[in-house]
Amino acid sequence: MKVLFVCLGNICRSPTAEGVFRRELARAGWQDRVMVDSCGVGRWHVGNAPDPRAQAAAQQRSIDISELRARQLKPQDFVDFDYVLGMDSENLAAMQAMKPDHADAHVGLFLDFADTAESEVPDPYYGGDQGFEHVLNLLEAAAKGLVEHLQRGR
């Protein structure tokens, strides 16, 4: 099983989602069953580490995302991954426009797997530290829901 998280630039939300989901997989004993990656629809930050604020917020929850590096979403990702999950409707629209017709990946929003009233993970880039905390709370809820979904057999 392969899961790809997508946001705008791959320096805040999607690398944090990758780290949170990896931790949730490890808690469930599924870390060897699921491959996880993240990327962005844009190429502005390719090769860069996650935003220092995202790293700090994740580290406060014992999640290390410092080694991750941004990359851009590509059409082949929809063939290589089983789930391609965006953070907001803008990401989702870009993903749907890029998905090749022959690709079988499930394309949707990560928060579809969370038990929350919110449907989108807001971009914390231009806000303060509290935005990164809120994003982590949402991602943790979605990660738990996605692991449960996978354990039920999709």
Image (spheres, rainbow, N blue to C red):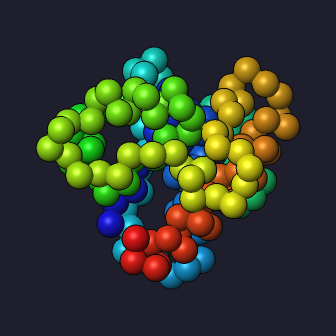
Seen as rendered, the residue at the extreme left is 102
Identify which residue, 89 or 14, lies in the foreground.
Answer: 89
User: Is 59 in front, or is 23?
Assistant: 23
In the image, taking residue 4 as reference, residue 131 lies left or right, namely right
In the rendered image, residue 14, in percent from the top left (x then y), is placed at 53, 41
Residue under the image location 40 percent in, 26 percent down: 94
Q: What residue is at 68 percent from the left and 34 percent from the top?
A: 122
Q: State which quarter of the image contains the N terminus.
A: bottom left
Quarter holding residue 93? top left
Visible in this render: residue 42? yes
Quarter location, residue 72: top left
| Up/down of 21 relative to 40, above or below | below
97 above or below 17?
Answer: above
Query: Which percent across, then down, holds residue 23?
Result: 59, 66
Of 95 and 127, nearer the camera is 95
Percent coordinates x, y for residue 7 in the rendering: 51, 34
How many numbered dots are placed on residues in this image? 0
* Quadrant of the rendering where the C terminus is positioned: bottom left
Farthest residue in the top direction? 44
> Which residue: 73% across, 20% down?
126
Given residues 141 and 28, the one toward you in this image is 141
Confirm whether residue 55 shows in the render: no
Whole-percent x, y for residue 50 in the image: 57, 36
Residue drawn 85% across the image and 37% down it: 130
